[in-house]
Image (tube, helix red, strand yellow):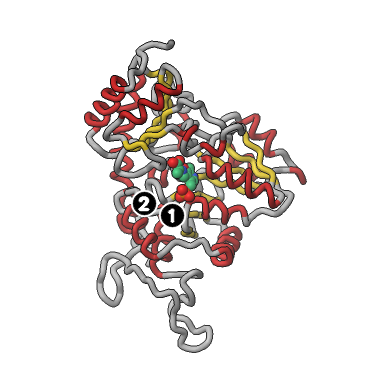
Amino acid sequence: MTGPTSDKFETLAVHAGAEPDAATGAVVPAIQMSTTFKQDGVGATRGGFEYGRSDNPTRRSLEAAIAALEGAEHGFAYASGLAATQNLLYLTQPGDRIVMSDDVYGGTWRLADKVWARYGIAVDAVDLTDLEAVRAAIGSGDGAARMVWIETPTNPLLKVVDIAAVAGMAREAGAITVVDNTFATPFLQQPLALGADVSLHSATKYLGGHSDVIGGLLATSRDDLAERLRFHQNAAGAVPSPFDCFLVMRGLRTLAVRMERATANARAIAFWLNGRPEVRQVSWPGLPGSPYRELVERQMRLPGAMVSFELNGELAVAERFVAATRLFTLAESLGAVESLIELPAAMTHVSVADSPLAVPAGLVRLSVGIEAVEDLIADLEQAFVVAAVPAAAV
Ligand code: P1T
């Protein structure tokens, strides 16, 4: 059920985790809804399947697929990105310290700061683009951090973290490096090859790709971590439905072409925004002025399809602007075929208000989809007019 191998991502994306079914020749893995599996004698299973929470054929296909795409030995599927995040907590003990990127999805910080903290896990928010600060924060010896949590590019500021450098420091100190690879996807970035221990996804985003499934995935090549993750996946039980696994796998088949198109659109939009008098500052890691451009070239295939920017004027201007677009839908989430727009401070990142992760109130975040880019630019242009965005700083 692992599918053919290739050193070309585009081929793997189409085939990973699936081979034509031995009995029927079906080219798509079946959605196996059975919650339990007949044993031919006590403990004598057919293919290791006993009970649907512990393992399921459709889920196993998806897990094989994400492992193949991340260049990993092991894959794990969960009911959401945060369920995958929660399962990584089970690798820690009370008294442990985690160093976390100071710009992450608001829900990741909320889980760490409001839940993990109650179980004796300390979380330090650190600018992981500052390697001296990272070294100091990780520390050494008995007091060293137990886990380093990288998100890159970060949500929503689109900072880019040097995975190889940070993972190297973490390894020296005996810490586990996790990379939330949601914004990049394994098509653009391969965290394990850069030295990370675990790659994490909200499969709800680019991997699913169609705004119709909530899911989470982990990939690792470390057998010791895999054994503990497998145990906790079953013990805690936050597993996805077989239908959800099917939807994520269906999304994976077109991941490479969607990412190429969405990134090309994002490039055009970022350059266009960068030249507009209404716009104060644009973040897209591929822009010529970006401090991350050289690192992106080293670490990523392409800079990705997320863009964030600030407009001239008060917060009310930004609020009017995001409500004035017609093709860009005002909504949380990202990574699907349709373009979305939002204000992180008031929407996806409300839970980081008054924390070290607070984001500028007027920051606008775009998840650029695969529509015709001329239509997307025209939509933003008409929204400048409708929202009466000032053409110069006021
Ligand atoms: O929503 P869920 O599938 O549980 O995934 C959480 C998550 C994890 N990591 C990153 C980088 C994410 O962006 C998310 C979810 N983010 C949004 C809903 C958002 O609009 O940013």
Q: Residue at x 51, y 61 (%)?
A: 238
Q: Position of residue 269 (x, y in %)?
A: 31, 27
Position of residue 367 relative to residue 49, above or below, is: above
Position of residue 41 relative to residue 246, above or below, is: below
Q: CA distance from mark 2 to mark 1?
A: 8 Å
Question: In the orientation shown, which residue stands out farthest toward the right?
Answer: 142
Binning the other alpha carbons within 10 Å of mark 2 as few (below 14), some (14 to 19) or many (20 upward) gives many
Left or right: 279 as drawn, with respect to 84 = left
Position of residue 29 relative to residue 125, above or below, is: below
Q: Position of residue 291 (x, y in %)?
A: 48, 24
Whether the residues at callouts 2 and 1 have beta carbons within 8 Å, the answer is yes
* Quadrant where the image shows the C terminus: top left
The reply to whether the residue tagged 2 has its Cβ within 8 angstroms of ligand 1 is: no
Q: Which mark is residue 208?
A: 2
Q: Residue at x 44, y 79 (%)?
A: 37
Q: Disc 1 residue type? A: Gly
Position of residue 125 relative to residue 58, above or below, is: above
Q: Which mark is residue 215?
A: 1
Binning the other alpha carbons within 10 Å of mark 1 as few (below 14), some (14 to 19) or many (20 upward) gives many
Q: Position of residue 207 (x, y in %)?
A: 38, 50
Q: Disc 2 residue type? A: Gly
Along the line of sight, which residue is nearer the eye, 306 or 334? 334
Q: Secondary structure at mark 2?
A: loop
Q: Residue at x 58, y 43 (%)?
A: 110
Along the line of sight, which residue is nearer the eye, 159 or 81? 81
Q: Secondary structure at mark 1?
A: loop
Left or right: 339 as drawn, with respect to 289 = left
Residue 3 appears in the figure: yes
Along the line of sight, which residue is nearer the eye, 66 or 367? 367
